[in-house]
Amino acid sequence: MSPLSKNFLRASLIYFMISAILGIIMVSMKSYPAQLLFTHVHLNLLGWMSMMIFGVGYHILPRFTGRPLAYPKIGNLQFYLANIGLVGLVSFRPIHPLVEIFAGIEVISIGLFVVNIWVSTIPPKPEPE
Ligand code: HEM
Ligand code: HEM
């Protein structure tokens, strides 16, 4: 497995642990701040779920067409942008325009994943007879 996939798997597991701990804190409180719910939801969905899919997806999806990932360096950049975007998004939710900047970084990282996987999974042209 590439370092890119391993990095995403490790990051995903760390966000899972943190958001599960936040979930336990939330069930134990009479009422919790909206910021805590936002952080729990997005560390789970953009951290644990999405990053697990990024890591497994980079490994397995291009293999379906028998070719390597089209742009591995863009994959590495996407790893950093996804993490910076997510941590910034949950840390600065109430602070404008910081939250918009980090949300934008998150969206760019999602776009880079989409393009990379899209290009990597176009089936090769069949060899002429
Ligand atoms: C130890 C594990 C977890 C605990 C203790 C936990 C706890 C909670 C609590 C207390 C709430 C607030 C619910 C309410 O007030 O009605 C909540 C909301 C939520 N949790 Fe978790 N959670 C856990 C794991 C997860 C996982 C694994 C995911 C997703 C992959 C997830 C996604 C969500 C979402 C999307 C909401 C918001 C639901 C809404 O919009 O009302 N949670 N969680
Ligand atoms: C660039 C990425 C994203 C941004 C900027 C974003 C932003 C937001 C915002 C502003 C809210 C309203 C909460 C509030 O007012 O504090 C929200 C709620 C929510 N988002 Fe996201 N989101 C993103 C990605 C996602 C993804 C990928 C998922 C699911 C896979 C998701 C699931 C949810 C859910 C379930 C809620 C409702 C949580 C609640 O009960 O309050 N979000 N998001």
Image: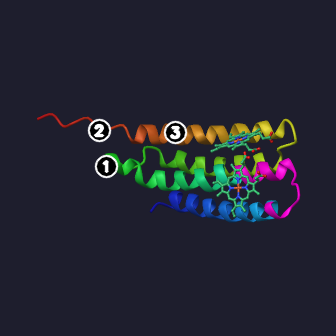
Q: Quadrant of the C terminus?
A: top left
Of callouts 2 and 1, the N-terminal one:
1
Q: Position of residue 105 (x, y in %)?
A: 69, 40
| In the displayed structure image, the side of residue 82 where residue 33 appears, left or right | right
- Residue that protrudes farthest toward the left in the picture: 129
Q: Element type at marker 3?
A: helix
Q: Position of residue 9 (x, y in %)?
A: 56, 61
- Residue that protrudes farthest toward the front in the picture: 30
Q: CA distance from mark 2 to mark 1?
A: 9 Å
> Which stretch did the figure color magenta?
27-42
Kindly check if marks 3 and 1 are in contact, taking CB atoms under 8 A apart as contact: no
Residue that mark 2 sits on: 124
Judge whether 112 appears above or below 40 on screen.
Answer: above
Kindly check if marks 2 and 3 are in contact, taking CB atoms under 8 A apart as contact: no
Residue that mark 3 sits on: 114
Q: Who's the residue at 63% across and 38% down the image?
A: 108
Q: CA distance from mark 2 to mark 3?
A: 18 Å
Of callouts 2 and 3, the N-terminal one:
3
| In the displayed structure image, the side of residue 41 where residue 58 appears, left or right | left
Residue that mark 1 sits on: 66
Amino acid type, label 2: Pro
| In the displayed structure image, the side of residue 38 where residue 76 appears, left or right | left
Kindly check if marks 2 and 1 are in contact, taking CB atoms under 8 A apart as contact: yes
Amino acid type, label 1: Gly
Say whether residue 30 is magenta. yes
Tell which of 73 and 7 is nearer to you.
Answer: 7
Q: Position of residue 110 (x, y in %)?
A: 59, 41
